[in-house]
Structure formats: C-alpha cells, structure tokens
Amino acid sequence: MKPDAETKPVVVIGGGWAGIAAAVELARHDIPVILLESAKQLGGRARSVNIEELHVDNGQHMLLGAYESTLDLLRKIDVNESDVLQRKPLSLQWYRPEKKSVSLNTPRLPAPFHLAWALLTLKGLALRDRLSALRFARRLEKIKFVIDNDCSVADFLAKHQQSPALIHALWEPLCIGALNTHLHEASAQIFLRTLGDSFNHARSDSDLLLTRTNLGSVLPKPAADYIERHKGSVRLGQRVSTLCIENGTITGVTLDNASIATTEVILATPHTTTQRLLSPHTVLQETCEQITQLQDRPICTVYLQFDKTVRLGRWLRGSLGTVSQWIFDRGLYGQHGLMAVVISGDGEHLQWDNQKLCAQVAAEIATQYPQWPAPQSQQVIREKRATFASTVNVNQYRPNAETAVQGLWLAGDYTNTHLPATLEGAVRSGRYSAQQIIAAHQRQRRQ
C-alpha cells in the first residue's frame, strides 16, 4: 500500500448488497469510503421499486438462517433481526395438479436430525421415495456435501438412485429456487454447498426469513445512514466510466462529470459492468476472459392484487408442473390481498407478453384456489439478468476478489464464493474485499 493511501478514500463502485457490505465494513474501521451508485437508490437487483401505486421489491427475495454474514451485517449497523425479518422453521408445501400436495416440515431437532425427520415424514410421496431421500441425505453428510468433480444436478441425483417422482417433487424445485438454474445444467457442487450450509450445521440455519418490510428498509437505508454517520459518503446517480490504472496500480476513477483520486477501489458492479470497466486494461485481460464465460438467468415476478380479504394461509406456497413456481402472500408487509408469483429460470413464458403471462398465472391460481375472486390488477417485473447461471464447472470461471492491479478488488455474488447468486454471497464477497484493504491499512500503521 502506498504511503498516501490512508489520506485518500477507498472508492466502492456499485451500491448493491456487495458494495453496501464493503462500504459498511470500511466505515466500521474508520477508513474513509465513498460509495458510488449509478441509480437513484441503493440495493442493486435487491431493491424496492414503485410500479404505479404499488411499492414492492424488484423480485421477491427470501433469506435463510444460514445467511450468517448478512445477519451479522444487520447487527453491525444496529438493525434488530426481529424488527425487519420474520423467522420460522423451514416449512414448504407444493401444489400438484390432480395429485396430493407435497409438504416438507423440519422439527425443532438438532442438525442433521431435523433434516432426517423432515425427509422421513415428507408428505405426498411414497415411503420408498422418502427412504431414498433419507439415504441420499446420509450419503451427503458422509462426504460433507462436497464432490471433487462437478456434474449436473440431474446426473448426480440419477447416480444416487433418486426416482423421477422424488426429483420432480423435491430436488427440482429446491434446485431451481436456490440456483435459478435448471437441473440438467445446474452445478452439483454449488447445489450441495447450498444444502450443506442449510442443513449440516445448526438447526436454525435452515430457518426461513422473510422480510417484514420492503428490501430498501432492511439493509440499504440503514446501511447508508451508518456509512454517513461514520464519515463515509454515499453518492447516488454517479456512473463510473473509467478505471484509471498506471503501472499496474489503481490511481483513480472517472465519472461522467468528475474524477476521484484513490489508490484503493472495490468494484462491486454486476459482472457485465465489471467486464466493461476492466476490458480496456491489458493487465486485466485474464480476468475479463473469465467473466465473459459467465451466463445469466432471468426471474419473472407477477404481482396480482386480489380483494384485501384474500389470504394464502401461509407465507409461501410452491407449485409443481405449472408456470408459477412460488406464491408469496404480501400481506406480511401489510399489502393484504397482494400475491407475488415467482418464476425462476428459462422457459416458454419468456416469449409471452405481460398480458398472456398474467392470464396464465391467474388461471393457475384459480385452479388452486377456486374460492378466490379474480385479481383486480396485475403487474410484471422481468429481471433478464437476475443471477449468473450456476452451471456445471462455473466455479472455475468465477474470478477471485484480488486482481492483477494493485489496489483493485472485485466483489459481487458472481465472484468465487462457491455459493449461488444469493444476497449472502454478495455480502460475503463485499466484506471479504473490504477486510483485505483493512488488513493492509493495519499493516501500514504498524510499520
């Protein structure tokens, strides 16, 4: 680190959850930081939006008890978990057309016994399938949810004699929900890592955490307040156009109408933006080549407003064999009668216009809940690049946080966290890059 590094602020580019986590960590250690975000609000893809009269999230997000870094970040900025999150033991139910619903419920037993009991008592599946799932889980425990050679989730499940009925009713919806990638192309390594984090440590790791308020109130707003209270700066509507690099060292950033001199930058932008900013610099060509190998997958969220008396009867409910995958009752947020229907990954629905998509989703809900009236209004959010695709061997293309340029670090859920594209992955990556800068500052002070 150069001698003047501590006199210049660290610049964090990108105000998503990775950038927020990085900026908070730096501010917490009294390191001057400037957080730059091109949009008019923080949050990135996990943000609150206004659609006509609706104030909703840009897609419905759910956290897990295993999100240790995210929960710790909330504590660090003085946000009480119970004020913004509602926690319950994992309880999932899937509707199946013309078949009995499938239910998975975890009891209050220590891990991994809670998973064993949940699989053994899985409702809606034959005993042989439940025993097969239990044997599979025990096998995963023995190998510590780790495999050396990656393969598709579909191939891995077939190798372990998971029946088509069991795959369709349990493993497939868990895979698409966690990885936003279909079974035939999804990475078994990443899927197993996700299962291990949720089920192989503490029982509470598998808890579901739904936000009590919109996402903007959970992290972005209190984090921005925290950063500015600790002498940091949050600047919205600031688009970085160029990274200034001289002799293999970061020297500053250029914005559309200004420039900032700095010797330390955390680039916490989506991987497509990161690639654009890195590509002019030959020294970063290898990293660019890695990033260009990453693909994206979409998520569509259909918001249907029913009469305010309509209730789902639970937080969320899955649906198998339909376009709709998950239904969330937004009554938890005080938006009674508003249902958020999530459709992850690729599919025929991407070719439909909003009217056809809403009609299909409404028809599927009418089949499941014939007593409900027709929806009064509808809105659609299409996030074409919602996540990177967690495909087979994708980990070898995910860049590390450290780059070939001194003082330049990467952050984002696409970096090599070994996790899928989740809020937790974003937070972990942001904190990691910030901690490397903090450690360098501490070494400098000791010299």
Image (spheres, grey):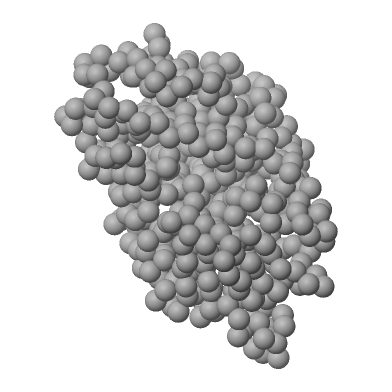
Instruction: Name the quadrant of the C terminus.
Output: bottom right
Instruction: Name the quadrant of the N terminus.
Output: bottom right
Residue 214, position as x, y percentages in the image:
34, 49
Q: Which residue lies at the image location 27% right of the left edge and 40% below the top edge? A: 53
Whether residue 119 is situated above or below residue 320 in the rendered picture: below
Residue 314 falls left or right of residue 433? left
Whether residue 267 is situated above or below residue 413 in the rendered picture: below
Residue 336, position as x, y percentages in the image:
21, 36
> In this orientation, which residue lies closer to the viewer: 334 or 143?
334
> In this orientation, which residue lies closer to the viewer: 336 or 90?
336
Q: Which residue lies at the image location 41% right of the left edge and 62% below the top edge? A: 74
Q: How many marks?
A: 0
Residue 134 visible in image: no
Q: Residue furthest front?
A: 257
> In this orientation, which residue lies closer to the viewer: 379 or 225?
379
Residue 386 falls left or right of residue 245? left
Residue 141, position as x, y percentages in the image:
61, 40
Q: Which residue lies at the image location 27% right of the left edge and 44% below the top edge? A: 333
Residue 426, position as x, y percentages in the image:
55, 53
Q: Residue furthest bottom?
A: 447
Q: Quadrant of residue 369?
A: top left
Whether residue 107 is situated above or below residue 170 in the rendered picture: below
Residue 141 falls left or right of residue 208? right
Residue 438 visible in image: yes
Q: Residue furthest left?
A: 309
Whether residue 98 is situated above or below residue 84 in the rendered picture: above
Q: Which residue lies at the image location 43% right of the left edge and 39% below the top edge? A: 59
